[in-house]
Amino acid sequence: MPVDYVIADDVHTRYAWLRDNGHLDYVRKHARCEDFFTGLQWDPNDMALLRANRRPALTINKVISTLANVLGEQIYNRTDITFKPRNEGATSEVAAALTKVFMQIAQNNQLPWVRSELFADGVIRSRGFIDLRLDFTDSMIGEVSIDNLNSKNVVIDPDAEEYDPDSWNDLFITKWVTADDIAVLYNPDDAELLDR
């Protein structure tokens, strides 16, 4: 692929602006929320002061017990998805076929667990994302692939006003890859250029 330094610079500049105007704050909040969930709730300065005075630090983690209850309720109240004919010309046979296709996609992707993990990410970290796309790894026809994304790697538009990603101006999904990965995904020339 030809290298266009102007486009690359524009994309990087926009990414850096999004990162510096909201995403880094979110990453700090994400870490603090995860620490609270796992029971690391003491401020490091307070812990050092307690250790210096040879006093214990007691943590009664109400967060994990409360969220465990909420997560259990989500699992207990999972919904099933079925299709029903609604508009003129829609038939119950097509709706039944769509329901079966969806069930096969859900089973292949372990969708109940993906949805529960997405819910947990949203409750604990305040953001959760799934990546839904056609995957051609197993079949050239393509199969639906549904995966959870690490919310720390999803850089969203700080000016977004809605939950719907279609209304956002920008979205970056960051991921560290090796030069070999770039050679496979794009071409060996790009990998060599970036490996310098």
Image (cartoon, grey):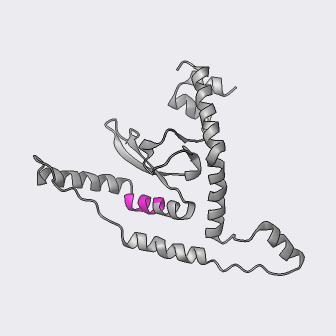
- Residue 75 lies, in percent from the top left, at 41, 70
Q: Is residue 161 visible?
A: yes
Q: Is residue 92 left or right of residue 142?
A: left
Identify which residue is drawn at 63% across, 24% down.
192
Note whether 162 is above or below 17 in the view shown. Answer: below
- Residue 196 lies, in percent from the top left, at 70, 25
Identify which residue is drawn at 32% across, 65% down.
79
Identify which residue is drawn at 42% across, 42% down.
166
- The reply to whether the magenta stretch includes residue 161 is no
Q: Nearer the viewer, residue 195 or 59?
A: 59
Q: Nearer the viewer, residue 93 or 160?
A: 160
Q: Is residue 191 visible?
A: no
Q: Nearer the viewer, residue 144 or 157?
A: 157
Q: Residue furthest right?
A: 52
Main secondary structure type of the part rendered in magenta:
helix
Q: Residue furthest top?
A: 2
Q: Is residue 55 left or right of residue 122?
A: right
- The reply to whether the magenta stretch includes residue 115 is yes
Q: Is residue 162 left or right of residue 150?
A: left
**Toward which corner of the image does residue 157 lie, by quadrant?**
top right
Q: Nearer the viewer, residue 98 or 181?
A: 98
- Residue 63 lies, in percent from the top left, at 59, 74
Give the magenta range. 111-118
**Toward which corner of the image does residue 6 lie, by quadrant?**
top right
Identify which residue is drawn at 63% across, 43% down.
19
- Residue 93 lies, in percent from the top left, at 12, 52
